[in-house]
Amino acid sequence: MKSIIKHDSSTPPRLRTLHRNGLAKRYLFSALVIALVPLGLLAFVYDTQYVRALDKVTESRTNARLSGAENLLRTFLQERIYELEALADIPEVFEWLTTARPGDTPDATMLAHLRQQLDSPHLYGVVTKPAGFDEPQWYLTRTLLDDVSWQTLPVTPFTNAELLGPALPTSERPGWFVLRLSPTGFNPAPEAWIGLVVRLASLTEQIQDLTLPGLQMPLIVTPQNALLTSVGNLALERPASRKDIDAGDFLDGWHIRLQWLGDPLLGPLESARFGLILLAVGAALGVILLSRHLSKRLERQVTPLIEGADRVASGDFDTPLGMEGTAEIGYLSFALERMRLRLRRLVKSMVDVERRAILGQFSAGVAHEIRNPLATIKTTIQALSRKEADPKRQKLMESVDHEIDRVNDVVQLLLDYARPREAKASKVDVLDVVGTVKILADAVAHRHGIELVQVEHEPVYAWADAAQVRQIVMNLVMNAIQAMEDIGGQVTIRIRQQGLAVYVSVSDNGPGVSADHLSHLTEPFFTTKTNGTGLGLAICRQLAQANQGALRFQSVPGEGLKVTLQLPLYLNNATQE
């Protein structure tokens, strides 16, 4: 983040340290550590522990699972041989195999025994080869023999029987094999035998538990080197892997192969590893970009605050601070702006108090020095006026006497401002005070073509000095009349009570006051009138504050001015007194 604080040789070392350990730099370092350390640890653990655990699990379970699967295969075949032996021992079956001649057909009893075997879910049918027949007799669905020559099927001995096949599955029919048994043995080649046509999938299902999804696929390798899956289908050809495991033969020419699916599995692992690396790099870049963005944003929000604080420190309390920023920066901006406004009010108040004190002392001195000569001049003029016979000179002396009275009124205002009388609070009927003022000001208002209106209100009482309240209201009404004395209009007096306060508002529809002048109306000697002294509203504010009240001004240029006097409500209890 670019420095927004200008350093020189006089910069305190502590401030330079704060700059070097800036928030943006610390945030960038912390964010990089928080983002990259977990990702690095995750990549390391994934790269070492997962693959190691995978090898350990597969290696420890392979031998035991292979032995169990081979036992299941042998047990399945042995059960089928038991069934075949039981069938061959039936007298009708034995007689058919040894005595049948070409053209003979099995009797009903033998057929019933053969059908009974077909109830097994593992069998497709039965085949018999009587000694007097050249070809075996197949009792099964004929489509199973499509494209199959039984003489070419591999022959595998198993205990006291033989396994013919398998007939490999095609798209038109399932695979099968024949377990055959001869009453006379197989050496030399048997003349008579009986066999069960066994469902090939029933045999391959015995290796289903060897499946490790995504890691290993069990297969049965037949004497034709065909690969059969656990559901009895031909496996898809795929390149051999050094991790393929071939078990020993559970029958001559038959064995189990665990085909390693490492290539399709390790591919995603490598992709995940590469993705983790990219994620770590992307996270680092993202953190750097985000930190840079936040640093710029923080700089844009903090710079106006620092510049504003420098302006306040140099004494500029009028320029507002930039109220930008969110969350904490926004709250800080708001707090600094409130501090600026309070400092401005405090400094203005202190300057105003000091100025009033000086002005009061000056006014009191000037009034005292002027009043004594004025009294002498006034007495002299009055004496000369009584002895003067010339009417013109008589009128001139009366004019001088009138001007002396006007100057004396200004001097009295100066004295009132310099040494205001202490307020003596009591119960004040505000409605009566306003009515009195209206009666006194009606004649002046009528003379200038101005209508003075008092809005009716029920009696309300304030806790204040009645004489000072009357003086304030009279001054406000006279100011409103003077603002419209050349144009005419209407002055309205309203009274209302709200909460623990009483409000007296005087509004006119005259030219109003501009926003620039509105905040200066109560300053001493500030006036917008050509012949005004600028002390009337200053004294009014002074008297309102002495009575625990306040003056408020509202104006729209061209629409008039509204002045509101706020006074405390009379509560009729001893605590207020």
Image (spheres, rainbow, N blue to C red):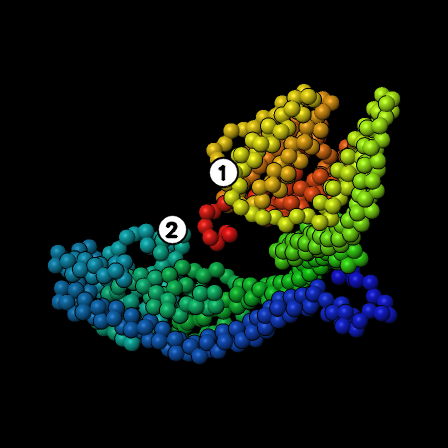
> For the residues carrying marks 2 and 1, which lies nearer the camera in this image?
1
Q: Residue at x 34, y 62 (%)?
A: 201
Residue 209 visible in the displayed image: yes
Pointer 1: what residue? 460
Which of the marked residues, 2 or 1, is nearer the chain's N terminus?
2
Amino acid on which the number 2 mark rests in the picture: Glu
Instruction: In the rendered view, tell whether residue 546 sits above or below residue 443.
Output: below
- Neighbourhood count class around disc 1 (C-alpha, 10 Å): few under 14, some 14–19, many 20 upward: some
Q: Nearer the viewer, residue 316 or 194?
A: 316
Amino acid on which the number 1 mark rests in the picture: Val
- Residue 187, quarter of the rendered image: bottom left
Q: Residue at x 62, y 36 (%)?
A: 473
Give the quarter of the figure containing the N terminus. Answer: bottom right
Whole-percent x and y of residue 247?
A: 43, 76
- The answer to whether marks 2 and 1 mark residues whose Cβ atoms lie closer than 8 Å is no
Compared across the picture, whether 406 is left or right of 279 comes to right
Pointer 2: what residue? 172
Compared across the picture, whether 540 is left or right of 516 comes to left
Q: Residue furthest front?
A: 387
